Amino acid sequence: CHGMGPTLILTWHKIAFFPLNLLLGQMTDLIYTEKELVQSLKEYIKAEESKLDAVKSWADKLDVVTRASTLDPEGYLAHPVNAYKLMKRLNTEWSELESLVLQDPSDGFISNMTVHRQYFPDQEDEKGAAKALMRLQDTYKLDSESFARGKLPGMHHNAILTVDDCYDMGKTAYNEADYYHAVLWMQQALRQMDAEEEHVVSKADVLDYLSYSVYQMGDLPRAIELTRRLVAIDSSHQRAGGNLRYFEKLLSKQLNELNQEGQEPATEEPIQLGTYKRPNDYLPEREIYEALCRGEGVKMTTERRSRLYCRYHDGNRNPRLLLQPMKEEDEWDSPHIVRYLNALSDQEIEKIKELAKPRLARATVRDPITGVLTTANYRVSKSAWLEGEEDPVIERVNQRIEDITGLTTQTAELLQIANYGVGGQYEPHFDFSRKEEPDAFKTLGTGNRVATFLNYMSDVEAGGATVFPDFGAAIYPKKGTAVFWYNLFRSGEGDYRTRHAACPVLVGSKWVSNKWIHERGQEFRRPCGLTEVD
């Protein structure tokens, strides 16, 4: 028997074949031989049935998932948990299914897997999706329970994280030495495990990661309590005993240094969001930025609101806007930020997306030292650049921007299309180059970025605001509208107040198009001044 299934071992008895007058005793041997063959065949069938049952279980589960996801793909993927689990399924679970099917010749399936493998997400993609959930968790102060149960604002699709999903999330964080998130997700895995939810991972493995991560967060009493639970479950665990002795010795030393007697008891409070302080990182305005993303700390006072107006804007009597002027609304007074309504039609938006989608690639930022475009962890989106000559719609959009702003777009950068999916963000940054990075736009030869024109090409169910931490403004995406502000004063000096960020998308998908307008060619359109005024 040739194949890759369970090994089929056949034991043949040595016999000689006689004519019909075969001795009865010899025939009896054949009976037992046949019985052994039947038993071996049953074992083979049982192995095949077991494999087929496993494959059928996979198929039934995935059928339910794909039926739900294909009814409304965009709505389904708008839920960040669904996006993460899609990454996880295609990178990890389908590979496990492939290994299962490979136990027996299944050329059609393997051929399909081989063809489609090149389009599958890899380990880095799965890790990125996990980090996106953690980023959302931090920015919007959502506990692991909320994600695991799919309790997100504005969601119409149910999506839950299993014990094993939570364990994998925690392990991803642990492998990045991110013990803060490792604790949150291992604790959630343990919570669901204690509630007797189904799981493959062992409780010992969860406690192993959790206890050490808690130790890394500086909570020795709880690390000791968790390690004792681990020892009680698996007394032969290779690390637990040594860790427990080390933790107890370390705590005793700390108590002696503090002149305290007795071991400090572990708190009975369960670990949750806020139990431990998130470590500081490279972003000084992290708390302000994230608060604005949540709609907290917005400094829109009654006095300021009284200075905001709406008007019809004809671009200084531009012929193309005289009969149909733009509706202009003030979003902020100083620096002056305006929003234009009906800046893009639905048809134009769909055409722009159609042109951009085949070219979307990981968005880049310009290195402040070299001026070279490169990817960065603080900008998570996909982008494409479109030229006016490619399609009349792009040319029309460029002309409209010029008409509205009164600035030439001949020296502007190409229209950049960006898509922010699950957890997509761009942390606080300046659009213009600072004095310490004089060569940022040198290769363009068009000077600094004098202004930004940002088109919103989609609504976003939750998250995705454009925020300005310096003066506490939050501007929310609204499909078809555009916002505009100057990055430079008339003196040519940068307006540092315009440091802004694209908040992580919590629910939905955010599409924008950016037009960065440069200094060259604006000499008579926006004459220079000597003072730093708007």
Image: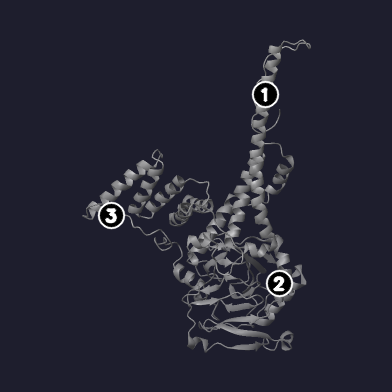
Which residue lies under the disc numbered 3? Answer: 264
Of residues 281 and 73, the one drawn nearer to the viewer in this rendering:
73
Image location of residue 13, percent across then percent down: 67, 16
Q: Amino acid at mark 1?
A: Lys
Image location of residue 132, percent across then percent down: 54, 60
Residue 277's image quarter?
Answer: bottom left
Q: CA distance from mark 3 to mark 1?
A: 68 Å
Q: CA distance from mark 3 to mark 2?
A: 61 Å
The residue shown at (42%, 62%) is: 280
Query: Which residue reaches farthest front?
Result: 24
Q: CA distance from mark 1 to mark 2?
A: 72 Å
Checking the image for residue 349, the label placed there is 2
Q: Amino acid at mark 3?
A: Glu
Task: Look at the numbered discs 3 and 2 and tell me whether their residues touch, using CB distance below 8 Å.
Answer: no
Q: Amino acid at mark 2?
A: Ile
Task: Work out whether 378 lies above or below 341.
Answer: above
Q: Earlier in the sequence, mark 1 or mark 2?
A: 1
Quadrant containing the N terminus is: top right
Q: Earlier in the sequence, mark 3 or mark 1?
A: 1
